[in-house]
Image (cartoon, rainbow, N blue to C red):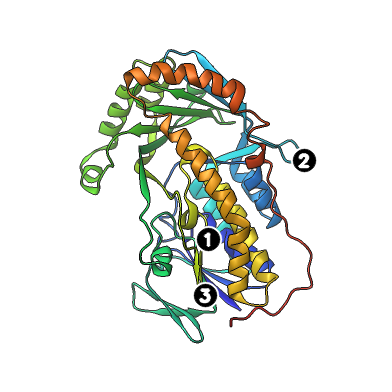
Amino acid sequence: MRALVIGGGIAGPATGLALRKAGIDAVVLEARSRAMATAGSYLTVAPNGLHALDVIGALDLARACGFPTATNVMYSATGARLGRVSLGVPLPDGTRALTMKRARLARVLADEAERRGVEVRWSSRVDAIEENPHGVSVRLTDGSRLNGDLLVGADGVHSLVRRTIDPTASAARYVGLTNFGGVTRGAAAAAGYEAEAWHFVFGSGAFFGAHPTPEGDVVWFLNVPRAPIGAAERATTSPETWREWLASLVQTDAGPAADLIRGGELELTADNTHDLPHVPVWRRGRLVVLGDAAHAPSPSSGQGASMALEDAVVLATSLRDSAFIEDGFAAYESARRERVERIVAAGARSSSAKIPGPMGRVFRDAALRLVFRLAVTDRSTAWMTGHRVAWPATGGVALRTR
């Protein structure tokens, strides 16, 4: 049994590793070259996602390329503390979450997948997908073809696989925020920041987050409420211009955000944020989607990567324990849909808190103090971060299609 997995971010190689563990051969296809797969900013993998990495034997890889995060601390633009929330139900060793560069985690997972016998093909952009009586076939932009028995779309929020499964599927929804991220180096930048914590500011012009690293640097990001940024604006705006504009958005806010931005380097520029509130069709025949291709939450949820990692494990075990591909896909969707759509909805509510008008900020800050004291607590979020996917023992069956 051979699976074609489209997408070489985090979800793709994780799925390759999970399928390999389930006894299914996998080929991961990534459009970017190996050298180009380094762009982007940082993400935090929650404890439920770390557990999924542990299930596929990759948790130590994440530890090696990340650093611990235990707490989120929230502030208003005036510097008043609005609340403090842990990153959730910890692993048995006490780890709550790990923060790391997204591209680095994707790369180490891809390298590990190759080491375990998963074929990873870089510079392999898929432009057409076909089912046939014997399996699935993909055509690459260079004209070559690959064949498999089933196909997994781990190709993100603008998924080709999702559109192939259901040509009427709704497009991803812009949530009103565009993202920037960077790093400021040197111990002076990290002065005053609590270790192992994200520091979030609901600012006057943008939502700002900063995290000190063990090396003494600070990684940071901004969610900026505005119209989507197009290719032309990206192409004609220099990093210096972006940084000065971003600094101006937080200039009047309490804290060092403006100085960090001016003294730092951009690693993520003008990334428009989309989500997928509901994808009616996840599967058709030998095709299925997972991760952001099936249920992209806003980054505000802090669960995008963790949801994809959970998906990889559940899909692999569902296929392993089914006699037919179609039944495996159905079992995977049944196990996942309610949970992930609940998380997407929670992320959408979080994003809306980042984009109120001037008067709305006054009421928002007052409301957030209550929210972080009474509603968003370790107990109330345990359903999200305390979830643990399983890899039950089984004798296995010979997977086939009807």
Q: According to the image, label 3 marks what residue?
A: 286
| Residue 290: % across, % down | 52, 59
User: Along the polypeptide, which appears first: circle 1 or circle 3?
Assistant: 1
Determine the CA span between mark 1 and mark 2.
Answer: 27 Å
Which residue is most to the bottom?
Answer: 133
| Residue 42: % across, % down | 49, 40
* Nearer the observer, 188 or 179: 179
255 shown above or below 244: above
At 44% from the left and 54% from the top, the residue drawn is: 37
Q: According to the image, label 2 marks what residue?
A: 92
Determine the CA span between mark 1 and mark 3.
Answer: 17 Å
Please tell me the numbered disc located at residue 12.
1
SS at circle 2? loop
At 40% from the left and 22% from the top, the residue drawn is: 203
The reply to whether residue 17 is visible in this rendering is no
Badge 2: residue crowd in 10 Å (few <14, some 14–19, many ≥20): few
Looking at numbered disc 2 in the image, what kind of residue is underneath it? Pro
| Residue 85: % across, % down | 61, 27
Looking at numbered disc 1 in the image, what kind of residue is underneath it? Gly
